[in-house]
Image (cartoon, helix red, strand yellow):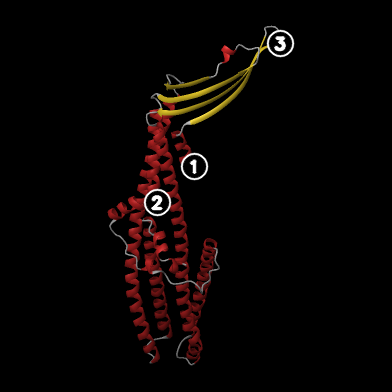
Amino acid sequence: KREDINIAKSSLYPTLDMTSEVARAYEKGSTRTTEDNVKNQIMLNYRILDFGVRDQLIDESNNEWSSANYIYLDRESEIAGKVTKSFLTVNKQKELLGIIQNELNYYNDRLHDFEYLVKSGESTESDLKKIQASIDSLNVQKISVNEKLDDELNTLNIYTNDLISRNNLTSVPSAISKYRFNMDGEAFLSLILKQNSKVLSADKKIDAAKSEYIASKDKFFPTVDFQAGYTDNTPSNDSDIDDYKDEFRVGVKVGWNIFNGFKDVSDTNKRRDMLNKTLADRDDLLKQVTLKIKSNAAQYRSGIESLKLANQSCRNARDLTSLYEQEFKIGQKSLLDLVTSRSELFRACSEIIESQYQVYTANLDQMLLGDMLIKTINENENVYR
């Protein structure tokens, strides 16, 4: 695109051309030459006036270059977003794996004691079966989470070209976890219009199409060129010297096309249609952005509400489990009651993680919409590295 700018700007400079030709005249009905001439000509042309065609085409090239730069930035932001989302998924799976393993450790550490209670008649065989079923379910979840974790680690390694493992991942950066979500949709849309690379690229596309359309209309006006040239003739000895005099010419040329088969009219109509298409594309983009803002806000609200309820549920389940353990020790609660309370606690802890990462993802999506992620990464390079 930068070279397109240079090509467009080249029209501002004069052109210098040199031509050489050899002419030979023959007698009628004979192969004998009557005279020869070698003609060398150098010509300087400079466009003085074209009613803005060159300026508009230069503007068009500049806007196309700016649009391409914004597209590159958008692509960079998109890749950073994919990597960060993959990073969040890995951390979420690690946390889920942690609570699954804690729950397995709880049951495995006490399984021998539970078996003793069944043998002694203090608990039933069905209670022990419930524990074994819980262990089996946790192991199945562990396999599934491990599989997802490995898949996301592979994705991270593809994007980063690094050997990333479960052990060298850091926690979620505070830039994401403590991001202040903007719930004012109109204010955030105004921010997007100013700094979102995809929107800015569309704006530059419109500016480029406008310049191209104006340039096509300006072609209906005449052009004015300055011309200067020198012609050197070298005739043969048998030629008439007066017919081949060297000459130097200076003049101004006015050109105005009267008819060219409606070519310029068709070109103008084409540029107008292209301008209308870029305007329609931007309108469609803004509709998509508006929808994403609303969807993102709904995701954030849902995540916050779910997180609040999950924390409350976890506190209640933890208190209930603690009471059940005490009552189980004195025989007031059965082993099945204790296992059921543990299952509720595990479910609540899982919901906290799911809800928390739903909020993180909503934060990340808004950062991507506002083109803030790359800036955040640059400002916190060591953390992200």
Q: Residue at x 43, y 34 (%)?
A: 12
Closer to the chain start, of discs 3 and 2, is 3
Residue 272 visible in the displayed image: no
Q: Residue at x 42, y 46 (%)?
A: 66
Closer to the chain start, of discs 3 and 1, is 1
Q: What secondary structure is found at the residue carrying circle 2?
A: helix
Distance of label 3 from label 2 (alpha carbons): 74 Å
**Residue type, numbered disc 1:** Glu
Q: Nearer the viewer, mark 3 or mark 2?
A: 3
Pick whichever, 44 or 121, lies toward us.
44
The residue that mark 1 highlights is: 3
Q: Residue 74, how many percent across, how many down?
A: 43, 52
The residue that mark 3 highlights is: 32
**Residue type, numbered disc 3:** Arg
Q: What secondary structure is found at the residue carrying circle 1?
A: helix
The crowd level at tag 3 (other Cα within 10 Å; few <14, some 14-19, many 20+) is few
**Residue 376 picture quarter:** bottom left
The residue that mark 2 highlights is: 197
The crowd level at tag 1 (other Cα within 10 Å; few <14, some 14-19, many 20+) is few
Closer to the chain start, of discs 1 and 2, is 1
